[in-house]
Image (spheres, rainbow, N blue to C red):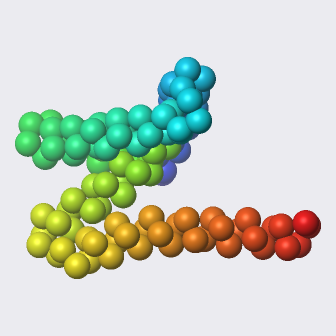
């Protein structure tokens, strides 16, 4: 139960961080979504720092590692986990799977969003 609590609390904190950071950046930006752009990039950087530091130097408990990565960074941006999974595939030499994962995730997620918009508009439009 400790792991579930760690992920839940971390997720809430990460979501709040995303809300405030992206909002602060976006309020000063143009129409380009700079807020989420910065959140996604900073989340990838933080994921890399945490994962590599915990592998090479830090001795994090499974609960603390889940709190930081799945919880905080997962709430902050799932793009960081997507980036980590992509790099792990590349490091294993699974280039075709990595390409499919990256292209498929982006394209199919956009198409799924369009489908969701279309379904609701057809039902209520």
Looking at this view, is 45 or 55 the one in front?
45
48 sits left or right of 101 in the view? left
Dividing the picture into quadrants, the one containing residue 98 is: bottom left
Residue 113 x, y percent position in the rendering: 63, 65
49 sits left or right of 14 in the view? left
Residue 33 x, y percent position in the rendering: 53, 39
99 sits left or right of 7 in the view? left
Residue at (29%, 48%) from the top-left corner?
62
Looking at this view, is 111 or 93 the one in front?
111
Looking at this view, is 65 or 47 the one in front?
47
Residue 71 in view here:
no
92 sits left or right of 25 in the view? left
Dividing the picture into quadrants, the one containing residue 83 is: bottom left
In the image, residue 106 sits, relative to residue 61, either above or below, namely: below
In the image, residue 14 sits, relative to residue 29, either above or below, namely: below
Residue at (12%, 70%) from the top-left corner?
92
Residue 52 in view here:
yes
Residue sitting at the far bottom: 96
Looking at this view, is 105 or 30 the one in front?
30
């Amino acid at each position: 139960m400790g792991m579930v609590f760690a992920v839940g609390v971390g997720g809430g904190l990460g979501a709040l961080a995303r809300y405030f950071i992206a909002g602060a950046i976006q309020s000063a930006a143009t129409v380009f979504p700079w807020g989420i752009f910065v959140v996604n990039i900073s989340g990838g950087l933080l994921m890399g720092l945490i994962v590599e530091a915990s592998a090479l130097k830090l001795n994090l408990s499974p609960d603390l590692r889940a709190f930081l990565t799945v919880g905080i960074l997962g709430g902050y941006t799932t793009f960081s986990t997507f980036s980590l999974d992509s790099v792990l595939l590349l490091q294993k030499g699974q280039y075709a799977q990595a390409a499919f994962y990256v292209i498929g995730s982006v394209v199919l997620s956009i198409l799924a969003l369009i489908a969701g918009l279309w379904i609701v508009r057809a039902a209520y439009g």
